[in-house]
């Protein structure tokens, strides 16, 4: 049997893993005051993926590191690796043996361990930052600047954004808890992300001479965007915190994959044709993400 080909089904933009996935939302706690205790002291750990019937948990020894990972069998023809908030996930054809899968992991162990370590360090850095206090007058990052949160006592909940004043007004009904307020703001940010991302996708796709089949939002912790061979593009909704220029870079990056499904020199030349300063954007995206306040703590 020939050695299985190793590649990724999804091409991912591993620019930053500043965020952690937050969906589905946690069960509603009892109503409480809009106050949250300070976060626990940070520590850097490699995540242990959750187990399930469909994705059994396996362990492999990589030097001094014992690494747990999810294994999923599929009809795909190659071994794929994904690193997200649950750690390492491996998708492999049914015909591939466990020994071949372990060998494929060892072949990419440097990349895997580096990404997991970076993710842990960034999570620790995020935990060191004080979370946003969800009070009237709080400053929230939006499209490269700040908007002011206005909490208004109301009999019915409402959410209204004043673009001139750059204020987001939320109607606070009696008994509203902090997690409910956070979810209301999150839903508004996601709706804005859908609107803005769709507009930018429709702007850059013709410039690149490509068409995409769908655009959906993601809450991935390790990537800003991804693109599949069938033209499905996912963009991290938290990009809405950043300036339009950085959103455009991620959009151009993912659309360019529809012409070059790799990160070769030809791919970067394709990105450069519509976004010349992609190197500067990558650096700015990394820097900005490290400076963001903590809006939605784990």
Image (cartoon, rainbow, N blue to C red):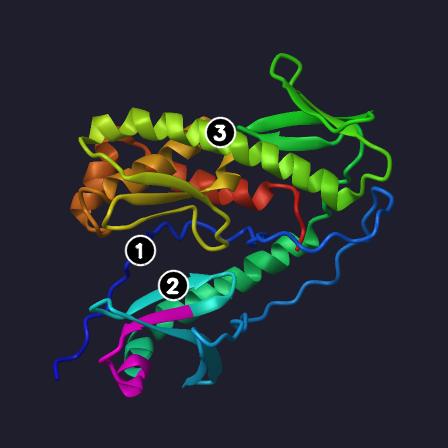
* Residue located at (33% from left, 31% from top): 201
Left or right, residue 287 beside residue 209: right
Reading the image, the residue beneath label 3 is 243
Under circle 3, the secondary element is loop
The residue furthest top is 164
Reading the image, the residue beneath label 1 is 10
Left or right, residue 121 beside residue 258: right
Instruction: From this view, report whether residue 259 is shown above or below residue 44.
Output: above
Q: Tell me if label 3 and label 2 are in contact, CB under 8 Å.
A: no
> How far is the residue under mark 3 from the one under mark 1?
26 Å
Q: Does 101 lie within the magenta span? A: yes
Q: Tell me if label 3 and label 1 are in contact, CB under 8 Å.
A: no
Left or right, residue 107 beside residue 71: left
Between 33 and 291, which is closer to the camera in this rendering?
Answer: 33
The residue furthest front is 156
Q: Quadrant of the N terminus?
A: bottom left
Give the percent coordinates (x, y) of residue 262: 22, 52
Quarter holding residue 5? bottom left
Judge the density around disc 1: few (<14), some (14-19), many (≥20) Cα neighbours within 10 Å: some
Of circles 3 and 2, which is in front? Answer: 2
Q: Does 16 lie within the magenta span? A: no
User: Which segment is the magenta one?
Assistant: 89-102
Reading the image, the residue beneath label 2 is 82
Q: Tell me if label 1 and label 2 are in contact, CB under 8 Å.
A: yes
Give the percent coordinates (x, y) of residue 199: 38, 25
Of circles 3 and 1, which is in front? Answer: 1
Between 104 and 213, which is closer to the camera in this rendering?
Answer: 213
Under circle 2, the secondary element is strand
């Amino acid at each position: 049997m020939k050695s299985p080909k190793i590649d990724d089904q999804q091409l991912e933009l591993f620019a930053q893993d500043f965020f952690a996935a937050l969906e589905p939302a946690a069960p509603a706690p009892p109503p409480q005051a809009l106050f949250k205790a300070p976060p626990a002291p940070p520590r850097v750990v490699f995540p242990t993926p959750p187990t399930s019937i469909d994705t059994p948990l396996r362990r492999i020894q990589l030097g001094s590191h014992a690494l747990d990972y999810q294994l999923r069998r599929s009809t795909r023809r190659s071994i794929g690796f994904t690193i997200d908030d649950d750690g390492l996930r491996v998708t492999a054809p049914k015909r591939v043996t466990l020994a071949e899968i372990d060998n494929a992991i060892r072949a990419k162990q440097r990349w895997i361990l580096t990404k997991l370590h970076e993710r842990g360090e960034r999570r620790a850095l995020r935990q060191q930052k004080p979370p946003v206090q969800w009070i009237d007058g709080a400053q929230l990052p939006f499209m490269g600047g700040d908007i002011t949160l206005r909490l208004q006592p109301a009999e019915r909940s409402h959410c209204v954004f004043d673009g001139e004043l750059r204020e987001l007004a939320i109607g606070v009904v009696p008994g509203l808890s902090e997690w409910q307020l956070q979810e209301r703001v999150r839903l508004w940010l996601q709706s804005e992300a859908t609107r803005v991302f769709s507009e930018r996708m429709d702007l850059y796709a013709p410039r690149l001479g490509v068409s995409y089949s769908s655009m959906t939002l993601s809450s991935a912790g390790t990537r800003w965007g991804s693109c599949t061979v069938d033209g499905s593009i996912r963009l991290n909704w938290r990009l809405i915190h950043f300036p339009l220029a950085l959103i455009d870079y991620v959009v151009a990056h993912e659309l360019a994959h529809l012409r070059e499904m790799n990160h070769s020199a030809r791919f970067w030349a394709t990105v450069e044709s519509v976004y010349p300063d992609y190197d500067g954007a990558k650096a700015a995206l990394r820097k900005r993400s490290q400076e963001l306040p903590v809006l939605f703590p784990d």
